[in-house]
Image (cartoon, grey):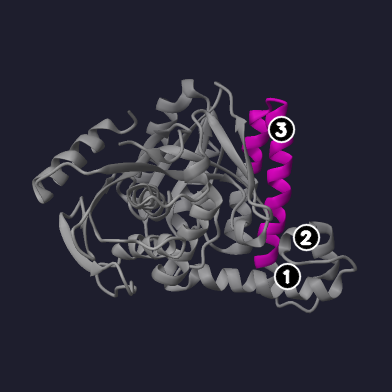
Amino acid sequence: MVNESVYNELMKKYRAHYGRDPEVIAYAPGRIEVLGNHTDYNEGFVFSAAINYGTFFAASKSASKACRLVAGDLMKEVAFDVTGIEASKTDTWQNYVKGTLAGLAGVKAVPCGFDGLFLGNIPLGSGLSSSAALEMCTGLALGKLYGITVDDVTLAKIGQKAEHMYAGCKCGLLDQISSLAGQAGRLVKTDFRTVAYETVEMGEAACFLMCNTHAKHALVDGAYNTRREACEQAAAHFAKELRHPVTALRDVSMAEWAIYKRGLSDTVANRAAHPIGEDERVLKGAELLAKGDLPGFGLLMFDSHESSRVLFENSCEELDAVVDAAKKIPGVLGARLSGGGFGGSVVVLVHPRDAETASIALANAYAAKFGKPCDVSVIKPAAGAHIVK
């Protein structure tokens, strides 16, 4: 079993808190975003992967309408009624569960409350989407508990709505789809216009390093939402200027951006250029992977980070330092920030034989600049969310 030690700890804590075994347990992994940044809500393309870190959610039906929810790392309990679910301003971690439960209740009436506990090992604020993992394992567990069946895309959209309505972050579907669709040793390539996805073999000559800088990673402070608003403003501009239909930035090429950006502020034009370029990099990356050209794919990752740094301005000093160090380390093929940005983690593409030496070099380079090393872990593309018990 993946993350068996976390599962065993979950069972121990559930029994101690509730005095019985849970009726159902679900697991959902976090994700790395490998290529394609802020393209999901622009109806574009993304390469991502479910990872070997995740969250378990255990639950049993209660005898009333009351829901009891425990955050296993804090062993703190909150309670709310299954009817009239509202977002909470305190202990805001509960909002991801509340929003997911509300989404399921919109599909089929929920007859009673639950006794739940969740526990995971995804580093919080690391840009690996612990929130989507919590939403997806919540959705699977409570869906099973209440007999509510939905397909993956519907469950992903329920998680997305929980982020929008309960957590205040206007995210796309990338995190949820990646958590659900992952497969061991494969990347997930998603077209977010149709929400169609496929998995692509990475090959044995590649693995990833996750470099968690612990830099501030808070998307609900408005930075994420202002970037999204700029993209929507740019899409509306190009819809008026171009001769073909434009419903999102996915419909605009870099050549068209260069010719027709006049009328946009420099800031909005730059914000738009980032996801437009990212879409082209993802499609090029798919061609390179099909040829087994990992060095070429890695160069696209470096290009992606530079676009984040200069055009979208969703990087930070700590992330830039990791990527700059990675460029100088033998065996490193590519590196870029992973996720929304503004802090969190860098994902690094290396050959497995170079993983250990590259990890040490990255940690030391970071420590030389900031006084303490970043956390470096080997990431393996892993199986997606599923029912465990």
Indicate left or right for 167 with 68 as reference: right
Marks 1/3: CA–CA distance? 29 Å
Q: Secondary structure at mark 2?
A: helix
Q: Which mark is residue 251?
A: 2
Q: Is 71 included in the stretch rendered in magenta? A: no
> Disc 1 designates what residue?
235
The residue nearer to you, when weighing 112 against 376, is 112
Would you say residue 292 sits in the magenta stretch? yes
Please provide the residue range marked out in magenta: 271-300
Q: Residue at x 65, y 66 (%)?
A: 271
Asked where in the image residue 373 lies, by quadrant, the reply is: top left
Task: First in sequence, mark 1 or 3: give its number.
Answer: 1
Residue 320 horizontal/vertical position (percent)? 50, 52
Residue 265's image quarter? Answer: bottom right
104 or 122: nearer the eye? Answer: 104
Q: Which residue is mark 3?
A: 288
Provide the secondary structure element on which disc 3 rests: helix
Q: Position of residue 268 (x, y in %)?
A: 67, 73
Circle 3 residues within 10 Å: few <14, some 14–19, many ≥20: some
Mark 1, secondary structure of its residue: helix
Q: Mark yes or no: residue 17 visible.
A: yes
Alpha carbon separation for disc pair 2 and 1:
9 Å
Residue occupying image coordinates x 70% and y 62%: 273
Q: Amino acid at mark 1?
A: Ala
Q: Amino acid at mark 2?
A: Asp
Label 2–label 1 contact, CB within 8 A: yes
